[in-house]
Image (tube, rainbow, N blue to C red):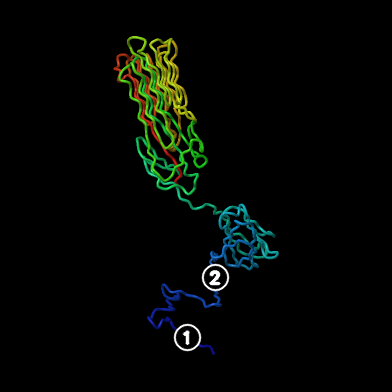
Amino acid sequence: MTSTVKVDNVQKVSDASNIIKKCGTTITLGASGDTIALASGASQSGFGRTGTVDWQTSSIKTSTFTAANGEGYFCNTTSGSFTVNLPAGSAGAIVSLQDYNNTFDSNALTVAPNGSEKINGGAGTINLNTEGEGITLVYIDSTVGWRSIQDNDFADQGSVFLTATGGTITTCGDFKIHTFTGPGTFSVSQISGTAAENTVGYQIVAGGGSGGTGHYGGGGGAGGFREGRNAPIDNFTASPLVANAPTNAITVTATSYPITVGGGGAASPNDTASGGNGNNSVFSTITSAGGGGGASRNCGSPGPAVTIGNNGGSGGGGTNHDPMNPSSKGTGNTPPVSPAQGFPGGAGGYGGAGGGATAAGADAPPGSPYGNVGGAGATSSITGSPVGRSGGGGGGSDTSLRSGGAGGGGTGGRNSPATAGTAGTVNTGGGGGGGSSPTVTPTSAAGAGGSGIVIIRYKFQ
């Protein structure tokens, strides 16, 4: 005879809390915080499997073994390849395998079926030989056998990235850019866990030289332009002057780096002295030299009233009261570095142009009362967009204005109508334009050099 007990709730004696509670069609076992366990040796049915495995984290496999249904294994092949034997297949059986420490590419894991059972419809073993690979297999039937329902590649390792402050900070994809338009400090508080990511990209541009004053003054030389790129970590579109790592590389540590941004050279207060040189810009071991000032010409007597173009990152342009006897032009890349940081200025006649980062200043045409255009600067996308810097200043001329080089070079002045040379653009290191008109006062006849800039770029995520 069958006995029946009919209740809605079963409660504990100690505190009358529910052990079993029925409400409508829902039966609740235990109260919040309770643990429901099967007795040792007991089995359950009716709850079903969720399609996952129980990962055996306390038993990392290093040699051949036989897997059990419902279990997942981390397999360490550091010491050599081995085999996982699958259990006898039964519909719904599931096994997962995962590369323990990214070594399957050097020592593959072999997966073997039981007897003549298949894997993905084919007879024989399979090899897991991709770094970080993991696979989940479910047994379907004798036609397909074990079917891979998930195959992944988790080789990426956890990492910390370089962290720093200083300057104006922007981002470009996975990279941060610190821009300094004046003196400051690049402070590194944390370096990357990947050593190669601690080499930073940079662009260091010195201040440009001013143009020469007086009549047909030479254009100012551009500030030295130096650029580095941490290839292959970072492949931004750089200038032709880029030094790819490890050449001239800057690898940072967790410390502070003072930044010097060079100011542009001031125009000479009189026409018996060359234009002022720009000032150096510095980051870590890299120094860019200020641009050379352009030559000046006294509007009065000949002889010592003519000066020469100064040497610098790029050289200042020359001039002379006698178009057939041009004065000396300034040399570029002074002091010498590789890749070169700039080019020489152009020779006089009248106003020779200042040198730029990628081209020499143009010579003034012999016997002609015209100056010439400044040397071209360099264009880089270190900030994410193409920007030109370090263009040379245009030379002083008679009636036609001579432009500065692309990249911030100032336009040379002219004699008629009387026009002063213009300054190089700020934070480009552009050279100032040479003066030309005797009716413009010496202190305003030539353009001052443009200030420099320092840019630092690194991977932050």
Image quarter in which the N terminus is found = bottom right
Residue 173 is at least partly visible in this image: no
| Residue 268 place in picture, x, y as percent | 32, 21
Q: Is the C-beta separation of discs 2 and 1 under 8 Å?
A: no
- Is 93 on the left-hand or right-hand side of 302? right
Residue 7 appearing in the image: yes
Q: Is mark 1 on a helix, strand or loop?
A: loop
- Of residue 204 and residue 71, the one placed in the foreground of this image is 204
Q: For this rendering, which residue is in front, 330 or 364?
A: 330
Q: Residue furthest bottom?
A: 1
Query: What type is the residue that disc 1 sits on?
Result: Val
Q: Residue 126, image x and y in percent?
A: 65, 57
Name which of mark 2 and mark 1 comes first in the sequence.
1
Residue 394's image quarter?
top left
Measure the C-alpha gap from mark 2 to mark 1.
Answer: 27 Å
Residue under numbered circle 2: 48
User: In this rendering, is residue 80 above or below 428?
Assistant: below
Q: Residue at x 48, y 38 (%)?
A: 249
Which numbered dot is residue 5? 1
Q: How many labels does the image show?
A: 2
